[in-house]
Amino acid sequence: MAMKISTEEFKERVEKGIHNSFMRGAVAGAQDRLRTRRLEAAAELGNWEEWRALGEQIRQHTLQHLDYYLMQLSENVAKRGGHVFFAQTAEEANEYIRDVIVKKNAKKIVKSKSMVTEEIHMNATLEAVGCEVIETDLGEYILQVDDHDPPSHIIAPALHKNKEQIRDVFREKLGYTKTEKPEELALHAREMLRQEYLTADVGITGCNFAIAESGSITLVTNEGNADLVTALPKTQITVMGMERIVPTFEEMEVLVSLLTRSAVGQKLTSYITVLTGPKDEGDVDGPEEFHLVIVDNGRSAILGTEFQSILQCIRCAACVSVCPVYRHIGGHSYGSIYSGPIGAVLSPLLGGYDDYKELPYASTLCAACTEACPVKIPLHELLLKHRQTIVEREGKAPISEKLAMKAFGLGAASASLYKLGSKLASSAMNPFTVNERISKGPGPLKAWTEIREFPAPGKERFRDWFKNREKGGDE
Amino acid sequence: MKVTLFVTCLVDLFHTNVGKATVELLERLGCEIEFPEAQTCCGQPAYNSGYVKEAKEAMKHMIRTFEHAEYIVTPSGSCATMFKEYPHIFKGDAEWEARAKKVADKTYELTQFIVDVLKVEDVGAKLEGRATYHTSCHMTRLLGVKDAPMKLLKNVKGLEFVPLPNAQNCCGFGGTFSVKMGPISEQIVDEKIHHIEEIDVDYLIGADCGCLMNIGGRMERKGKPIKVMHIAEVLNSR
Amino acid sequence: MTVGNIYRREAFLQNIAQRLGRDVYTTGVVRPMWKYAPQHTVFQGYSQDELLEELKKQCLRIHTTLVETTCHDLAATLKRIVVEHGGGPVVTWDDPRFDEYGLMPLLQEEWPNENVSVHIWDAKLGRKNIEFAEKANVGITFSDITLAESGTVVLFSGNGKGRTVSFLPTTYIAIIPKSTIVPRMTQAASYIHQQIEQGKQVSSCINFITGPSNSADIEMNLVVGVHGPVKATYVVITDR
């Protein structure tokens, strides 16, 4: 799975999303539940705004000194006997990982959930050299078994599927014979995957937070799959986006607290695992060999720009879980593994405007995302910056819109032009007006009136009434 | 107290009654209303579409028009928010940033002005019926005005207030979003209407004409008998 | 220990520094004084008893049974819990605290005599230990630090303290001396940070475990027990 998950046009994807009634019901239910849990978790702390401000400051400081902390991290990993590879591109990362795997003569790989490995399309590279790559996060596993269906939510990748669909997939692909009860489905996955952990040659993980002071990586799960992925195979490879780092354990702790509360309303998830290097001498379980792959893949190009704050993201998906647009179109409509507001900001930055130019407009700018973000990324403002970039630098806006906005600029900046234009509006709309309503509007009004009535401009503008009244006219 | 009214382009052209109600209401509360004829639009349509250059022209014009006011009051949470954003938008341009800040600092949304400046919570309004209130996003999240409309509505005689389920969710207006992303906007507004219908009210009240045009226009298209009112009209009912 | 390799670092960091508009920082960066420190105010000044009360409350929310006992009754309590969960096999850490708390007779005599097989982690056996853990019904460890707010046991794994004891068996039991309870993760993180500052080596695996494993990946329905344990019990020793 690469970052781009569809070749269809945005409009077609949205159309499909809107007509997927199960998915929409599931998303709405999940949003409502996650929102309530997040707010309760924040309220229980009592000083959530201080926590957010602290989270923001930690992330900003770290990004501002990213080279220093990556240097420290890599030194400390190496001191503990781990290897570190800095990959500028997805290809470099994949090549390195493939080389390690080929050298180990590995055939079976177990993986815990990782967005960055999806982003760089790692699984395909490894499958191409004959490896079996097994996703162990329950949601990711379901998607993989279902012919690599793409994830539709950062923290709940299989949100768009119902239990009956999952049962059918398990029956068809895994010889499953039981019912659609989530407990039975999960138990089946547990049994299937146990054997895989025990026989895998390599374990691959993502990384929630790397800790510079000790060269550690932190993995956050509820299932415990990351623990098995890292404890049982003899080789461990961890892939991290270069910004997923904190100075010390103390900052890791703060960000984990923000992450688990914002993502699922939990104080901590069931498993927070901090791993440092390969296993020590005398250790029995844990990998003999540890590789850390630090991926840039377009991130450094965001540093130092007006979009830098998007790198503060800790992938909690709180913004996704409150977005009214995501609510109705689902994750697949975004055409990227990164969906919702974070996806609408990040996908054009990492994947370019050609593929993702519609995403910045797929927002009502309601700012629910900005309000929910635990590290205070001004998401709706970044969407605006994208729109500005598309208009000013990319020149990708439609001509009719440019002309309309040019006219707006002139009209709204001139009292006399505005007055004239607004006076003409009423008579211009006359042919379309029935009972003071416009039901089939011309030009830009057409899109509005396809869905709603539009009020006809009044015969008398407010300003006319006011002037008349000041002169002592009737009210 | 002298109040300079920024009526907004939507009210000027389409919702004249909201402007009239605002004037009458404020006058009854002892304000003297000034209406600068030169006012146009806050620039939001262009700004939110990425046309910052064009938007800035409109904004400069509005700054010139309003900078001498004592209090600027507007019957729109969203347009008030835009005025508040001006200094941020002109950041780096010392002269205009300073002038923008002067304007931003004295800008108030109508209910915010009544409650926070005039210190009035009961305006003596009367309206019979069941009503709910749509909390518009810019007003609530960006301007931070949450309680003022509730305080005022609570004191409207005869009005039975019913909370709106999922009130925090956007109505799907989003300015140009409503036409650029029509099919998505339609789904969002339909969910909003579903929740309004759920509680069986006579009135839907709001403080932003954009949202009200969207929800109202859709309800009208679907033949829903719920009356849409701007909060200025409600507070001016006697 | 052999030092690991670092590949392609220089150009990578150079590029970052360039984007940030400056030369590469390799030294001299200090963490600022953070503007806020809300994490320190949680359960500030609570006694061990008050912390235990908070821990109990939280356990109700994380599908975890909390049992209080004393040093004297610990062995009997463990015996009872293991029976309730269907008996052995049992796997435990090789940890001096089992001796300190008088549990060796239970592990070495009582249980084996009652046909409850016990495997105490034995580094000499290598990966054979994992097979025992995989077959075990119950895994038992001590908690090194316990977090009241979240209901979390912190395990510093390594050597005799095998990682898989806490997550391969179906049931997991954590023994928690009351003195190990602290308000929240903050205190554990500070402790570890201080150890690092003093030049001590952090253990290769630190687990923060909060109840049994679970997932909500199928229609947001909570399923308890996915890859790790299905059941978790905390045994708090109130007089230590």
Image (cartoon, grey):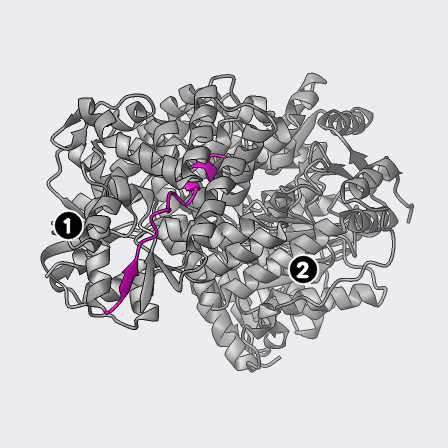
Q: Nearer the viewer, residue B119 or A104?
A: B119
Residue at image point 33% right, 48% down: B37
The mark total stands at 2
The amino acid on which the numbered mark 1 sits, given as a three-letter code, is Tyr
Task: Tell me, yes or no, if residue C176 can be seen here.
Answer: yes
Q: Which residue is mark 1?
A: B203
Q: Which residue is mark 2?
A: A251
Answer yes or no: are tags 2 and 1 on the same subunit. Answer: no
> Which numbered tag is attached to residue A376?
none
Could you say which quadrant of the image residue B109 lies in? Answer: bottom left
Q: CA distance from mark 2 to mark 1?
A: 50 Å
The answer to whether A35 appears left or right of C176 in the picture is left
Q: State the extent of the magenta-drawn residues as a range.
A: B30-50
Chain containing mark 2: A
Q: State the SS at label 1.
A: strand
- In the rendered image, the quadrant that contains the C terminus of chain B is bottom left
